[in-house]
Image (cartoon, rainbow, N blue to C red):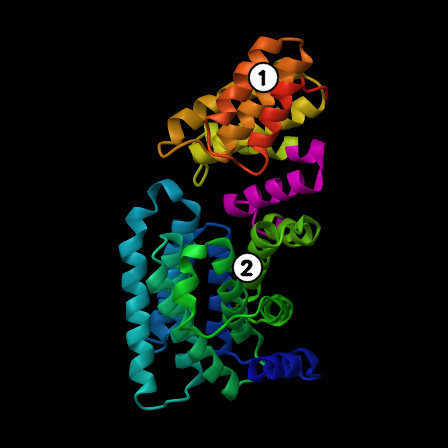
Amino acid sequence: MKHILLTILLLLSPAIALSQWSILSTSADSLVTLGENYIYNLEYDKAEQCFKQLQQEYPKHPAGYFLDAMIDWWRILVDKDNSAKYNDNFLRKIEKTVKMCDAILDTHKLDINALFFKAGAIGYRGRYYVETENWISAAKDGSTAFDLLINCLKVAPNNHDIMLGCGIYNYFAASIPEKYPIVKPLMLLLPSGDKVIGEMQLKASARGARYASVEAKVALMQLYYTFENKPNECLPIVEELHKTYPNNPYFKKYYARTLVRVGAWTMFEDYWRQILIDCLANKYGYNRDLARESMYYIALALQNKKDYTQALKYYYKCDEGCRAIDKKGASSFMSMTNLNIGKIYDLQGKRELAIKQYNKVLKMDNFRTTHDDANSYIKRAYGG
């Protein structure tokens, strides 16, 4: 009930613009905003310069150190193939930020900046542990960060930046156990989450946060695409992120994925072709996983246009990529690719080859309805 009341107060406050707080002087505040934009557009060197300057001007303020850690966080997020080489740096910077905040809180227990950046540092470390599937550490950090943010809200109840962390915890503490049942026992000892409240908090942060607006939009993008399957709500958010930060492949791939979900066939084929070109050119953040994904969606678009010969060429290359990537068993891409190859063979009148493909699918892990579909098409040829 306490969290619900805090959220309602935030959303109904007529003085939202006046409630935002500047963490530093005007000039340094501009460095924060500029540096954040550099991070999202993957201009890491420029972001680093901004935050180093911030650290020099405010050596005892945690902002510059926390934001410097965010450079490594986005490197981990974008450059999956090489993420391991950024892990230690990220964790070291997070630890430094936490220690700086603790030094301030030892003297001033309700210092808003120290509470905010300590919560942010621990919260992002928790998200790192989610990425590495270290569920116990993720749950512990998530709970600690949430408690710190609740203390922040007591000091600044109308602050939209604080709502980012609260929203992330509330939504994902409720939804992750649903998606990953292995973590359910861990959540029994932690504050319960609320998906509806979390979504409201993230929307509030996306609308009105001074520093956290983009991160709130990223969280909403993930929420609508991965957990809620609401592509029409995801599309305007991810389109804005992609167009604002065109150098960021993380936003581009989610935009292309969402175009698939909404059935924008021509647009999604064009975008996945662009992504494939960037993968072949070895551009930063464009890896073989993304190349495999792009070939699948290009093939799907060609199949939809009944250009079966070209579709098969891309499906064959996607299948080849799957066999190189999927070391722990067939992925959903391998399963769907082989199912679709079988469907095309049926449409071409190559019944024996089609049945061979469907039998391949049945030997793979079931993905959604792939086994049911394969069994159905074995009994009766796919007819379009």
Q: SS at mark 2?
A: helix
The residue at the point 35 percent across, 52 percent down is 132
The residue at the point 30 percent across, 64 percent down is 93
Left or right position of 338 against 135: right
The residue closer to the viewer here, 208 or 29, is: 208
Q: Is residue 80 visible?
A: yes
Task: Answer above or below: position of 269 versus 246.
Answer: above
The residue at the point 42 percent across, 58 percent down is 47
The residue labelled by disc 2 is 219
The image shows residue 174 at horizontal and vertical percentages of 52, 65
The residue closer to the viewer here, 110 or 325, is: 325
The image shows residue 243 at horizontal and vertical percentages of 62, 48
The image shows residue 96 at horizontal and vertical percentages of 28, 70
Q: Is disc 2 surrounded by few (<14), some (14 to 19) or many (20+) residues within 10 Å?
A: many
The numbered disc on residue 312 is 1
Question: Type of residue at label 2?
Answer: Ala
Proximity of marks 1 and 2: CB atoms separated by less than 8 Å: no
The numbered disc on residue 348 is none
Quadrant of res 311: top right
Q: Nearer the viewer, mark 1 or mark 2?
A: 1
Q: Quadrant of the C terminus?
A: top right
The residue at the point 37 percent across, 53 percent down is 133
Q: SS at mark 1?
A: helix
Question: Type of residue at label 1?
Answer: Leu
Left or right position of 65 against 167: left
- The residue range painted magenta reads 243-268
N-terminal of the pair, mark 1 or mark 2, is 2
